[in-house]
Image: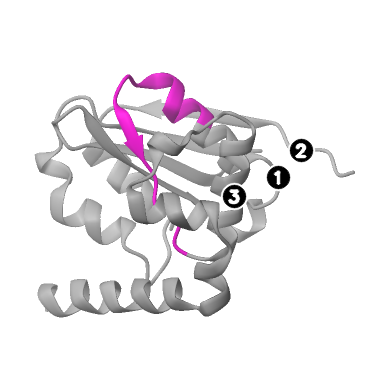
Amino acid sequence: MSQHPVVEYTLIKSLPELHQAIVKHKLYLEKGLMLDHLLRSYKGFPDDSFGYLATVEGVVMGVGVLASTGDGEGDGMFFVKPAGRGKGIAKGLVKRVMATTDLTVFVYPWEKKSIRFFRGLVNTGILSIKNFKPYEAHLIGSNAAFLTGQLHTECRRAEREVVSKSA
């Protein structure tokens, strides 16, 4: 069993500062929606939005963002660089985000690995079914979505819509 690295988690309450760190350290998928979401709307987030950076041996390896929607709810967005995956960094980010807020946090599994990851967090009690909108709750409870590949197709369609709207 491999030993997990020592991870330092830094809370950042300034979303412009958090956005700058995400861009500087490339803490996003090139084709993902998190960066686009932050680019378009971080200035409008209420004051209870925040994020954590995860650093290992001086290198920023991941980010967890809670983007408040202003209605007692928030969107949880998480990213860990490939070199840091499987080492407990994402789990630590989710735990800290969940412990720092009283908002109802929604997370969005979007492909096979994230479905397994979030399902595991439900199984350990870090998350519960209340952290998923009905569609996502169905995904973590069933293997059918990623067996058919429909989830991946729907995510790519949504990404194309976002890109075409911003062009």
Rendered residue at 39%/35% (across/down): 130
Residue 155 image position (x, y, % from top left):
36, 71
In the picture, the quarter occupied by the N terminus is top right
State the SS at label 2: loop
Residues at marks 2 and 1, CA–CA distance in whole angstroms: 5 Å
Judged by depth in the image, the label closer to the viewer, 2 or 3, is: 3
Residue 13 image position (x, y, % from top left):
29, 27
Which amino acid type is shown beneath numbered disc 1?
Answer: Lys
Mark 1 lies on residue: 87
Q: Are marks 2 and 1 in contact (CB under 8 Å)?
A: yes
Mark 2 lies on residue: 4
Residues at marks 3 and 1, CA–CA distance in whole angstroms: 12 Å
Which amino acid type is shown beneath numbered disc 3?
Answer: Phe
Of residue 5 and residue 41, the one placed in the foreground of this image is: 41
Which amino acid type is shown beneath numbered disc 2?
Answer: His
The span picked out in magenta is 95-110
Q: Residues within 10 Å of mark 3 (few under 14, many from 20)?
A: some
State the SS at label 3: helix
Residue 116 image position (x, y, % from top left):
61, 54
Of residue 38 and residue 136, the one placed in the foreground of this image is: 136
Mark 3 lies on residue: 117
Rendered residue at 34%/34% (across/down): 105
In the rendered structure, the answer to whether residue 4 lies left or right of residue 122 reads right
Residue 164 occupies quadrant: bottom left
Q: Which residue is outermost to the right?
A: 1
